[in-house]
Image (cartoon, rainbow, N blue to C red):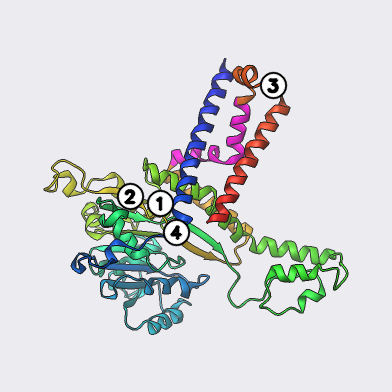
Amino acid sequence: MFAQTVAALCLIWYIFIVIVCSIGYLQLFRYYSKPPTPAACLSEGFPEDEIPHITIIRPVCGLEPRLYDCLAATFRQTYPRSKLTIYICIASRTDPALPLLERLLADFPAHDAKIFVEDEDKKLLNSAGDNDNGRGEGARLGPNPKIRNMSRAYREARGDVVWICDCNVWVGKGVAGRMVDVLCGFGERGGGRPYKFVHQLPLVVDTVPEGEDSPPAINSKSNSHSSSASFSDVHSDSLSTSQTPLLRPSPQQKRSIFSHILQTAGGRLEETFMASSHAKFYTAINTVAIAPCIVGKSNMFRRSHLDSLTSSNAARSPGIDFFSDNICEDHLIGDMLWKVKLPCEREGGGEGQGKKRFGTHALLFGDPALQPMSSFSIPAYIARRVRWLRVRKFTVTLATLVEPGTESFLCSAYLAFAVTTLPGFESWVGVPRTWTAFWIVWVTSVVGWACVDCMLYAML
């Protein structure tokens, strides 16, 4: 009886996960298989005085892959230039990215853009004139490096709308306008309902390192190819029996290939994970909106909203400074805007007395936030996953505990156990209660799951 009860729970869980995955899968194909429509706020006839000013804050730390292209994407927005301010933040003038940032500003002189240096922020200096790094009794800001990096830019932001976009994220030209549509409730995309917080689906693109040659091939002929040849071209030419005999790789060459994969395949693993399993659940959870689910690569909100909810700590300024003593600041900001009512909501806010005036979170469907990666090793990928699991067990404990059961291997094992344990499957479907049947069901489920993920990965 106990085994059958557990099996029934396993079956219910599997069905629930399939429903969640189906929601995510359908939404992704609905919105990401075609180009998004132009922003309503930028359409002809839309009142210019109703278009809000956006301050884009981009925190930078070192040289990231395709950094120039990622940062330049915000300068290339179709949003009105007069309504756009871009603040780029670095920790110190010794940051290796500084020359690139200065070149970026020189390439786009007509934009309202500025570089903020954390070490030059007077608010963060101690009595000796040095950066206190959030340490010491009189520190006016906590040790969170990203918050310290962005603090001055946030304090000096123009207008009410703030868009925080990580430096290693590339966005399309029309994203600013479409995010404003959702945030302010403009047009069909906004649905007439403004939101407190808008974010994007994060995706990763594994790229070839800038300035590097193609990966090493396995014989001497391929080594003579120019660096402009693709890996697939080099590989196919290397194995062409019509031009050169097949060569068996030596043990040293085998080790070289294995070492190359170990040192570079982490980016492909991250790309695959973000464009399959993660994308499904991220989209599904944000569709049903039962809980806050954000990664924090690209977020837009109003300063007035966040400031009104973060004025309780006298030692910290309202806004993002409030979160400077914690990590996962993106999650905490989103969590607060989700859970805590704004003063205007608590007081009724005039029209619609007693009713909620703002939606909590909204995912900008159709516009992913793309993060380029290159030369990302498998050990680095594993370390990254472990690090974030450690953080998540404190921020979203329940989700972290049940998360293994959402993955294909374990969830398929739940199904196999249920099918080979519950008597109904044997009497109605003819599935025997054997280990052979268990493994057949498990393999079938895993293969089907993999096929869905492959289609999703190919589409994204």
Mark 2 or 4, nearer chain start:
2
Report if the CB atoms under discs 1 and 2 are less than 8 Å apart: yes
Q: Nearer the viewer, mark 4 or mark 1?
A: 4
Q: Which residue is mark 2?
A: 361
Mark 2 or 3, nearer chain start:
2
Can I make out residue 459 in this image?
Answer: yes
Q: Toward which corner of the image does residue 285 lie, by quadrant?
A: top left
Mark-to-mark CA distance, 2 and 3: 47 Å
Residue found at the very far right of the displayed protein: 245
Mark-to-mark CA distance, 3 and 1: 43 Å
Q: Nearer the viewer, residue 440 or 142?
A: 440
Dot 3 crowding, Cα within 10 Å, few <14, some 14–19, many 20+: some
Q: Amino acid at mark 2?
A: His
Give the residue displayed 29% in from the left and 68% down from the top: 55
Q: Which residue is mark 3?
A: 432
Report if the CB atoms under discs 2 and 4 are less than 8 Å apart: no
Mark-to-mark CA distance, 1 and 2: 9 Å
Give the residue displayed 33% in from the left and 53% down from the top: 333
Q: Which residue is mark 4?
A: 368
| Residue 26 percent location from the top left of the image | 47, 45
Q: Which residue is mark 1?
A: 294
Q: Amino acid at mark 4?
A: Pro
